[in-house]
Image: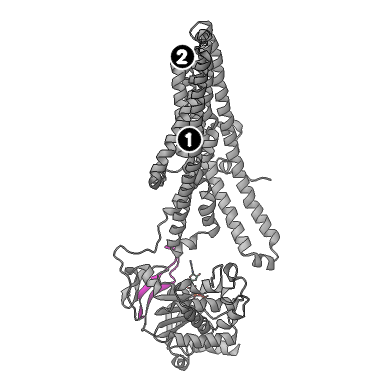
Amino acid sequence: MSSPSPVEEQRAPRHSFLKHLFVRADSGAIAPEIRRAHSRRFVSYYRPHLPLLAAVLLCAMLVAAAALALPLMTNLIVSRLADLRTAPDAIWQLLLIGGLMVGVFLVQALATYFVDYQGHAMGAKIEAQVRQDLFEHCQGLSFSFYDRQRTGQLMSRISNDSLWLGELFHHAPEDLTIAGLKFFGALTVIALVDPLIAVAIAVLIPFACGYALHFNRRMSLALRVSKERIANVNEKVEDALGGIRVVQSFANEADEIRRFAGENQRFLMSRKDGYRSEALLWSGMEGFGQLVTIVVIVGGAIRILSNDLTAADLLTLLLCVGVLLDPIKRFDNFIRLWQEGYTGFTRAMELLEERPEIADRPNAVPLGNVEGRIDFRGVRFRYETDGPNILEDLSLSVEPGEFVALVGPSGVGKSTLCSLIPRFYDVADGSVCVDGIDVRNVTLASLRSKIGVVQQDVYLFAGTVRENLLYGRPGASEEELIAAAKAANAHDFITALAMGYDTDIGQRGVKLSGGQKQRLTIARAFLKNPPILIFDEATSALDNESERAVQQALVGLSKGRTTLVIAHRLSTVRHADRILVLGKNGIVEDGNHDTLMAKGGVYSALHSVQASI
Ligand SMILES: Nc1ncnc2c1ncn2[C@@H]1O[C@H](COP(=O)(O)OP(=O)(O)OP(=O)(O)O)[C@@H](O)[C@H]1O
């Protein structure tokens, strides 16, 4: 059974064709003040292109004027036919008018070319700008935003939604100018030729406008829903293909196909709803066009019979009706383009309006050279305002150059604690300080440049080994690059790869083993060479021998810099200056390996358990 359409879903029970025709279409609409703000933003995108826009609009006016010239010149010829019969230079006069017409059409052709080419180029530039703005904006959004958002949805906003923007930015001013000039120009000529027929046409126009606006709103709603649905489809594709190894290893292909079919079907239904409104709009506008033609033919004939109009005038009127109806016939196209483009624009603006929760304070200063002291002062933290506290009244001081290990059961907040130092999240209460300065009072870029983080989830970019290593320090020399790789025990496996440091490692480093990926991320942090290092389970995917080698390198590298290491395997941190045991109620033990073992508390118990495995 097919799922209900989005608009139907909002207005159960299902309605008939007639209900569809007359139902109000403003539910789900955007608030007027937001719409106004979006409109201002829309107009602002033209600012860097004003001279080009002016040239395009001028050419658009020429196109419209040339279209109106045809009925006028035809009138000129036909109304003078009687005089021309007796004129000795009739052929020359006709040839002159013909030449004039050719000139007009030449101007029209050149203007059309300019509007089409330069107009589209301007639209494409603005589209690229919006896409760039979106991408740049997303780069600055906080971890908490990405905790809530899904990548597929974001990709859809940045790539899919912006596809119609170029067309919209180009066609909106151009089509409106041409359509407006043709419509009102033709109506004016009709009024000059026969005011009564012009009035008859003008009476029909409000009905056509009301009808068009109604279906415009319906299409807008349907398109908005359909954009949300295609974002869901993208999200499903991203999830299922990104995790294809998990899908296949669980033999869950059929389930994934079924889930995808569901999203695909929902998207299809939203399209169908939009197409129905579009078809009703299109057929209605066609009907309006026919009605206007009939009014002019019948009305014109009656006026000829009463000697108020000549045959030449009727011919002019019919040609003018063609010009008048042209924008109406293309109205459907324009509305579709407008809706597709403007809905995408609105969704893009919603994303741009998203404020980063973590940002530089207005008075933030750059963090200068740091010694590496870290203080947590009465820190309380939770991920969501109504969520549980993950850290509560936590105080802790790490001296410059100290090597501190964080151990404890899974989920007590070790990674969370570390993520507060580079300000991936902000504390709810208390403060986190580096060298005595609250991290919220310094610029994010300067703070993060002082901290190297190797995260639990290894992330490598598509590209070569070299590109990935240089990510943290693009200007590093070849010697520094190799030294970092050697320190992370990665140099040997890198040189054994087909292209050495220039080997492409595939999407997210898929062509490497788990341990190799981990060593690359460690080398990347080594190369950055920051005064504060944070390793979150950084050696978990290494075999014992590699792990020992990396541990040794880490000990060497940590000299003179503050190092925090989160570890589950206690054997890897027994050499640490301090070991902090984190429990549900914060730090429950603090000391070095020997003192904690002698104490016989949580650490020694954990140690005994691991030693017995
Ligand atoms: N982004 C997030 N949004 C909401 N809750 C989160 C988020 N990240 C972690 N948590 C929750 O915070 C708590 C602490 O997680 P954290 O990753 O800091 O623990 P951990 O001690 O490092 O665990 P592990 O040793 O398993 O890595 C957990 O209950 C977890 O579910």
232 is higher (above) or lower (below) than 358 = above
Q: Which residues are magenta?
A: 372-394
SS category of the residue bearing label 2: helix
Residue 407 drawn at (x, y percent): 48, 82
Q: Image point 54% across, 24% down: which residue?
A: 322
Q: Quadrant of residue 541?
A: bottom right
Instruction: Specify the amino acid type for callout 2.
Output: Leu
Q: Which residue is mark 1?
A: 111
Q: Of residues 378 and 338, which is closer to you in this image?
A: 338
Task: Mark 2 and mark 1 in contact? Answer it, CB < 8 Å.
Answer: no
Q: Which mark is residue 196?
A: 2
> Does 380 lie within the magenta span?
yes
Q: Of residues 351 and 460, which is closer to you in this image?
A: 460
Badge 2 density bin: few <14, some 14–19, many ≥20, Cα 10 Å: some
Mark closer to the chain start, 2 or 1: 1
Q: Of all residues shown, which one is farthest toward the left?
A: 363
Which quadrant of the figure contains the N terminus? top right
- Residue mark closest to the camera, 2 vs 1: 1
